[in-house]
Amino acid sequence: MITPRVFRTSKPTLSFLLTILLAVCASLAGAQTQHSCANLQSLSIDNVSFDASEVVPAGGFSPDGGETRANSPYADLSTFCRVSLTMTPSTDSDIKMELWLPLSGWNGKYMAVGNGAFTGNVRHSSMHAPLRRGYAVSSTDTGHTGNTASFALGHPEKLIDFGWRAVHEMANVSKTLINAFYTQPASYSYWSGCSAGGRQGMVEAEKFPQDFDGIIAGAPGLDWTGRAAASLRIAKHLEANPDARLLQADRELLNDAAIAACDADDGVRDGLLSQPMQCSFDPAELLCGAGEAGSCLNEAQLATVKMLYSSPVNPATGREITGLVPGSELGWTDLGWTASARATGLEQYRYIVYADSEWSIDRFEFDRDIALAESQDDNTLNALDPDLSPLFSSGAKLIQYHGWIDPQISPRNATQYYERVVEKLGGREAVHDNYRLFMVPGMGHCRGGPGPDTFDAITALENWVENDIAPDSILAEHYSDGVADRSRPLCPYPEVAVYDGSGDIEDAGNYACRVP
């Protein structure tokens, strides 16, 4: 149980009364003082030890503690209270977190931000934008340092911390500190994360539906064990068969052919595939003829393409382990999936599944190992429970988004999960008031690509949670050299943006969201 000391003191003490007086005065003045920031360390919170609590002057933050550079992205931050602490919910836990509290202009709300891959560090770069919007914002290192899964070897409690406990504990501690600092609770609490941060948000939605009023989960690694297996399945094959590898020129050839075949499926030729799963492209048309070489693929390469597009079934569960989609080829590598996907997969099996620091990809067997990994996981890393009814009952809202050309986490993973939720809870209308998935044509992993990859999901979520204005579409733009040169409405799946037949094809105003 997390309880500030002031609520457990039987008799008011002088320091207690002084703290209350200072907090009231600061509240009336519309800003907190440096003294009230420092006094946060006097709170007693179960399994929490404070490392520092200090006021950071406007433009004075530097992640490495050095002097702030003039071109630093943190140079525009206003004065804030920076709290650093350690959480130890288990005897083997060592979870670092930071909470940034605006000294003026607080919007009355709290936002937590997510991590990436197996990353173990507080994400200062993700805390910047919410603080600028007036949020109290927190981030955690998930209980370890570094960007490998080696922390999990022989430390099952640390794996639980990484999987879900660090975020849940952070949310509770942050709310306690916010209440103490501002002398009132946050009016709304939000989560925002992409990739592993999207997975963290979905775990929160499934396990702790009361933690957040609204969740943004971008490109979530929902099927964490499945993606690990999918990337290693391809990597093992290509490490052993160099002739089957797709080099840069081969991937460009393949991408050009896929776009040419399916670009017009949504009614406009714009270089983007809005419905890649309906794409009728057959890569066999690129097969080299007798004596032909160059702009074509050999038999072994063609087999690789089919492997990358395919979704093999987990023999233990019957669930497809989703592959990549037409249009994503420029993000592939010589060994198939991205280097990050392979590294995460190797780490998963080396340190978690087999607990063997010498384990290598050549020992991987798909049917055996995907079933083993999932049986061991027990919903520690995976976020695959389709029963979101507790989240919906709490009134919380969930925005999930995913780029259609993501080469790192399969976008089909997002649509598969959404469809399973719809099936579980009785149809689209049963989930539409609380959960919407936005698929982004031409966007890669979280950002990037030729599609409209810049959009404001936070405002869309705020309007939904706070004003009951559901996002029937979200305006998205693509920028080149700082200038917006393409815009589209992002539509709640399975709707897609359909061109109305007139006007600039790069203007979102000439599109409408419709079910194809």
Image (tube, helix red, strand yellow):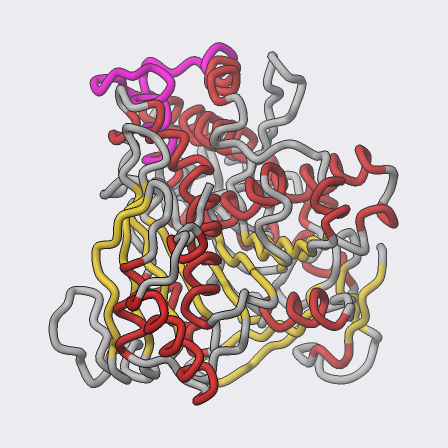
Locate residue 58 relative to residue 478 in the image: left or right: left
What is the residue that sits farthest to the bottom in this orientation? Answer: 29
Where 157 falls versus 484 (above or below)?
above
Examine the rendering and report whether any part of residue 289 can be seen: no
Q: Is residue 358 magenta?
A: yes
Which residue appears farthest toward the top when viewing the image? 368
* Residue under the point 70% across and 77% down: 508
Tally of numbered discs: 0
- For the point 75% across and 58% down, which residue is it? 492
Which sits in the foreground, 445 or 337? 445
Question: Quick one: 36 or 345, which is closer to the camera?
Answer: 36
Position of residue 52 relative to residue 143, above or below, is: below
Residue at image position (63%, 59%) is 441
Q: Position of residue 240 (x, y in %)?
A: 32, 21
Residue 185 picture quarter = bottom right
The residue range painted magenta reads 343-369
Q: Is residue 189 visible?
A: yes
Residue 208 in the figure: left or right of residue 269: left
- The x, y position of residue 15, in whole percent, is 29, 67
